[in-house]
């Protein structure tokens, strides 16, 4: 059985897809004014300010925690800087009950959902209040109550999982969908292809949000793929696709809102390619001066998505300089004070070494754990984090 | 009770699970209307609809990624990988995702509902890529359970046990026995425990340990050895991870001898792990070195399959050598 409906030709005709050109959707200019023929989406003041606060919170958290990493307080950090509109704008267009399966640079979505500074800090310091029980490196957040799947380091594994999760939502008929975030580098992984193809074949309510930020660590997008971005791949899967100015909060919000409608009402998966720029290093372990110029970065600094939104809010008289100053000061203080508190909290108890591998600790692991504890009891000074916890037992 | 072969027993287990809970879904390559290349999912699509039993595109990493997401959402996916030889594109999803989902999230999320079914093993003239026994790769990954049944009754009870177990489980099906092994199988829902070995036959001189299709080989070797007057205790491990150390150790404390047999190659095979643990537990009771009768360290051959495989004659020789040590 053939699956093509193509017309027949009688000489070898090749095609390179050049006839397809994907436009970029924009609404907001850098000065905070709308483009001439653009119309702002339906976004009330409360929601607009919730979005803005989440973006500013993310920026301040990132600045402060990178500094903390430089001071040696923290082992590792990753910033969302420059991509706040792409992440928060898309998350804000969803229902809070929709599942978010992110890559690792999407703390803005979590901030929007209401993850508190205290919750961020507990994970970053891996203390006894970290939901992940101190098992993962910093920025691997997760929240069951906020429907934010715990981050996993391997790239792109979350993409086919999002297809499966959304298939389950469709079966449950609860009117929810899943969004999954990934970079243009991760889109080279086989899991990306598997996920989009399966979603299209099975008509799954999932939104694939590619943050095309120009770099996969040091590898520029031009060395990642020959095509015009990631978006054209959607044609191959027969999937709806849109390319959006990722630094344009209004465009990101409206595009995702429309994508969600297609996903939930028509079971049509959607690919969104958000064009942006990773203004910060890949992580605290990376130094971009080895692979890109300050001039290039300066061009994108001029396109700051947060400033763009602020100017729009001010033009609507929804925001003032005083409110800005107050938010900046309040957030900086909260981040600093919360960090100090979180840093002082004790590490997770010793038994978290062996719990959650299975639903219950199996006998062979219980036996290994007893040996570990006996060893710590023998050398308590060598294991200051857990000597106290090792006291119980045979 | 109905007389069934192993495929019918597996089909019955899936049917039972799907009838009891509409969150149970079966999918994989050719699993839908065709019922799978071995027909383990026959009639399930007809009975439960296309949404619950369906074909997937030909992409193993996608099948397991999709299954992980479904399980995290609260569904109960039973994913089929058509041959265990083709599970490796999904290795990352199984080893880095399924196995670590609960641990890395501090139990906020889990994929405990996941079961992966896949036919394994040789003896069917399948050559390199339709014969492998990859259980040891997965046994090296904390967080997974690994189960292998030896006959139809075990297959249904263990598969239902795996589907209901709150941990991601790999269920390796001995495809050589799919139609060759026939027995009485209860029609109703019954679940055999995971992590429990079964002493199939009691004896006093030597312990024979295996799993899956190798149990049949061991039983033939034992018949021969018993004619020589050697009393053999035979244990089916059933669950490779976590494995039942107590049952095996208690047996070896009694017999003083142990022969372990599996089809997978010797080096890094699971028999090595068992031997290391049992010599620790039973060191002063051992009458002879623990023996391993396994495939040799080559890719799986085709024409010389018989020479490669640990057949009953090789197991019999190992029993004799152990007793005469």
Image (cartoon, coloured by chain):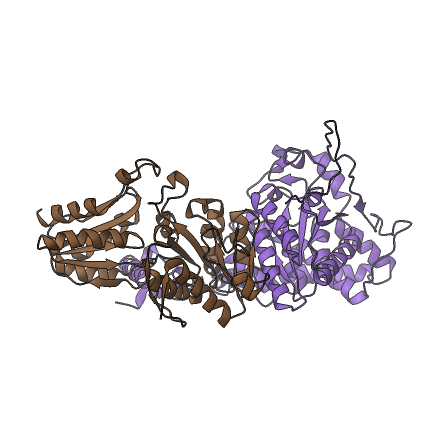
Chain colours: A purple, B brown
Position of residue B95 relative to residue A176, above or below, is above
Q: Residue furthest right?
A: A36
Q: Is residue A106 visible?
A: no
Nearer to me, B158 or B49: B49
Nearer to me, A302 or A191: A191
Q: What residue appears at the point 71 percent right and 41 percent down from the top-left corner? A: A232
Q: Residue furthest top?
A: A11
**What is the x, y in percent for residue A271?**
70, 50
User: In the drawing, does residue B301 fall left or right of residue A178?
Assistant: left
Position of residue B31 relative to residue A186, above or below, is below
Instruction: Locate the C terminus of chain A and report the quarter of the image it occupies.
Output: bottom left
**What is the x, y in percent for residue B167?**
43, 62
Q: How many numbered tags mark residues here?
A: 0
Position of residue A46 relative to residue A273, above or below, is below
Q: Is residue B110 visible?
A: yes
**What is the x, y in percent for residue A13?**
74, 29
Q: What residue appears at the point 62 percent right and 44 percent down from the top-left corner? A: A187
Name the image quarter holding residue A328: bottom right
Nearer to me, A108 or B208: B208
Q: What residue appears at the point 66 percent right and 62 percent down from the top-left corner? A: A177
Name the image quarter holding residue B246: bottom left
Instruction: Locate the N terminus of chain A and report the quarter of the image it occupies.
Output: top right
Q: Residue furthest front?
A: B3
**What is the x, y in percent for residue B236?**
27, 59
Name the image quarter holding residue A146: bottom right
């Amino acid at each position: 059985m053939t699956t093509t409906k193509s017309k027949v030709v009688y000489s070898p005709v090749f095609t390179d897809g050049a006839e397809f050109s994907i436009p970029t959707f924009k609404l907001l200019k850098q000065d905070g004014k709308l483009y001439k023929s653009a119309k702002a989406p339906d976004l009330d003041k409360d929601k607009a300010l919730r979005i803005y606060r989440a973006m500013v919170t993310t920026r301040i958290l990132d600045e402060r925690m990178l500094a903390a990493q430089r001071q040696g307080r923290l082992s590792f950090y990753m910033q969302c800087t420059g991509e706040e509109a792409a992440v928060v704008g898309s998350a804000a267009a969803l229902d809070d009950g929709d599942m978010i399966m992110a890559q690792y640079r999407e703390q803005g979505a979590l901030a929007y959902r209401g993850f508190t500074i205290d919750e961020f800090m507990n994970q970053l310091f891996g203390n006894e209040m970290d939901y992940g029980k101190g098992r993962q490196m910093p920025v691997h957040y997760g929240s069951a109550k906020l429907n934010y799947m715990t981050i996993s380091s391997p790239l792109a594994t979350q993409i086919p999982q999002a297809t499966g999760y959304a298939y389950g939502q469709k079966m449950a008929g609860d009117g929810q969908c899943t969004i999954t975030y990934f970079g243009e580098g991760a889109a080279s992984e086989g899991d990306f292809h598997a996920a989009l193809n399966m979603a299209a074949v099975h008509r799954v309510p999932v939104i694939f949000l590619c943050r095309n930020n120009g770099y996969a660590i040091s590898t520029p997008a031009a060395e990642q793929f020959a095509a015009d971005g990631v978006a054209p791949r959607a044609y191959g899967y027969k999937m709806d696709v849109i390319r959006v100015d990722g630094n344009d909060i209004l465009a990101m919000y409206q595009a995702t809102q429309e994508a969600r409608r297609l996903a939930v009402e028509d079971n049509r998966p959607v690919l969104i390619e958000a064009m942006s720029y990773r203004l910060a290093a890949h992580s605290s372990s990376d130094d971009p001066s080895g692979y890109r110029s300050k001039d290039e970065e300066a061009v994108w600094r001029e396109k700051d998505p947060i400033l763009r939104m602020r100017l729009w809010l001010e033009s609507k008289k929804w925001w003032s300089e005083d409110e800005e100053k107050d938010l900046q000061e309040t957030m900086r203080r909260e981040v600093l004070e919360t960090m100090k508190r979180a840093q002082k909290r004790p590490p997770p108890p010793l038994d978290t070494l062996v719990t959650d591998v299975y639903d219950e600790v199996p006998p062979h692991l219980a036996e290994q754990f007893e040996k570990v504890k006996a060893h710590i009891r023998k050398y308590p000074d060598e294991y200051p984090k857990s000597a106290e916890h090792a006291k119980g037992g045979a | 009770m109905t007389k069934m072969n192993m495929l019918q027993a597996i089909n019955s287990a899936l049917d039972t699970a799907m009838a009891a809970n509409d969150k149970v879904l079966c999918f994989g390559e050719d699993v839908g209307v065709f019922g799978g290349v071995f027909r383990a999912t026959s009639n399930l699509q007809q009975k439960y609809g296309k949404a619950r039993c369906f074909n997937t595109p030909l992409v193993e990493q996608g099948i397991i990624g999709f299954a992980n997401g479904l399980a995290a959402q609260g569904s109960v996916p039973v994913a089929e990988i058509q041959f265990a030889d083709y599970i490796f594109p999904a290795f990352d999803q199984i080893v880095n995702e399924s196995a670590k989902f609960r641990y890395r999230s501090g139990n906020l999320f889990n994929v405990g509902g996941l079961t992966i079914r896949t036919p394994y093993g040789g003896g069917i003239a399948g050559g390199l890529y339709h014969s492998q026994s990859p259980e040891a790769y997965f046994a090296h990954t904390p967080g997974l359970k690994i189960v292998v049944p030896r006959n139809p009754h075990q297959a249904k009870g263990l598969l239902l046990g795996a589907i209901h177990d709150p941990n991601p489980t790999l269920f390796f099906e001995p495809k050589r026995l799919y139609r060759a092994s026939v027995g009485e199988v209860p029609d109703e829902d019954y679940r055999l425990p995971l992590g429990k070995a079964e002493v199939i036959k009691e004896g006093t001189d030597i312990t024979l340990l295996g799993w899956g299709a190798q149990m049949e080989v061991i039983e033939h070797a034992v018949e021969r050895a018993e004619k020589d007057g050697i009393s053999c205790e035979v244990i089916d491990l059933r669950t490779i991870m976590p494995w039942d150390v107590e049952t095996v150790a208690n047996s070896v404390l009694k017999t003083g001898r142990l022969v372990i047999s599996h089809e997978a190659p010797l080096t890094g095979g699971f028999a090595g792990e068992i031997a290391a643990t049992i010599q620790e537990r039973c060191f002063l009771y051992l009458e002879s070195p623990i023996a391993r009768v396994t495939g040799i360290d080559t890719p799986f051959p085709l024409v010389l399959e018989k020479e490669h495989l640990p057949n009953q004659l090789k197991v019999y020789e190992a029993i004799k050598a152990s007793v005469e040590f």
